Image: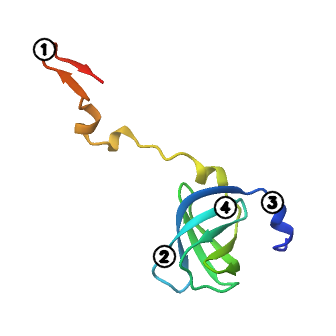
Amino acid sequence: MSAVDTRNVSRDSLFLMADITVEGSVHPVRAKVRNLSAGGMMADGDFTVERGMRLVVDLRHVGHVPGTVAWVQDSRIGIAFDKEIDPKQVRARVGVSESIVPTHIRTAPAFTDPQIGKRRL
C-alpha cells in the first residue's frame, strides 16, 4: 500500500508521548504522538531523520515497535510500523495499582474529627 493509499485508513487523533530511537543512535527522542493507526503514526519531535530510516517506537501498553520513516515535514514525521498494532491498547487508561500507592497515602483520612474520632471527607 502506498502512502497515498493509506490516507483513508482509520486513525486516532490523540495526545500522548513516546520514545523514538533511530537506528544507530543510543539516545531516544521524546516525541508527541499526533495520530495513530494500526499501521503507523505521526510524531512531532526534535528529529534528525530522513525518509527510509529505521527506528523503534516505545509505545505505552504495547512496547517496542520497529518501523520506517515514511515522510518528514519540519518537526513531524510519519512512521510505518513493520507489523500492525492495536491502537486501542495504546489509548487504554493508565491505572494505578493500589499495591504501589504508599500506605500513608492509601490509608490517611482526609480529616478526622477529634471529638468523635470518625473520618470526614
Q: Nearer the viewer, mark 2 or mark 1?
A: 1
Which residue, given by chain and number where applicable, does mark 2 sit on? 28
Which residue, given by chain and number where applicable, does mark 1 sit on? 115
Of callouts 1 and 3, the N-terminal one: 3
Badge 2, how many Cα within 10 Å: few under 14, some, many 20+? some
Kindly report the distance in space between the C-alpha atoms of the residues bearing marks 2 and 4.
Answer: 19 Å
Kindly report the distance in space between the C-alpha atoms of the residues bearing marks 2 and 3.
Answer: 28 Å
Pick whichever, 22 or 49, lies toward us. Answer: 49
**Which residue occupies the extreme left position in the image?**
115
Residue 76: give x, y in percent of width and height.
Answer: 64, 75
Kindly report the distance in space between the C-alpha atoms of the residues bearing marks 1 and 3.
Answer: 64 Å
Helix, strand or loop under label 4: strand
**Identity of the amino acid at label 4?**
Asn
Which residue, given by chain and number where applicable, does mark 4 sit on? 35
Query: Tags 3 and 4 in contact by the CB under 8 Å rule?
Result: no
Q: Residue at x 13, y 14 (%)?
A: 115
Residue 105: give x, y in percent of width and height.
Answer: 26, 38
Q: Residue at x 49, y 47 (%)?
A: 94
Does residue 48 sit above or below 79 in this rendering? Answer: below
Which residue, given by chain and number where applicable, does mark 3 sit on? 9
Residue 77 sits in which quadrant?
bottom right
Left or right of 84? Residue 47 is: left
Badge 1, how many Cα within 10 Å: few under 14, some, many 20+? few
* Quadrant containing the C terminus in the rendered view: top left
Counting the numbered discs, the total is 4
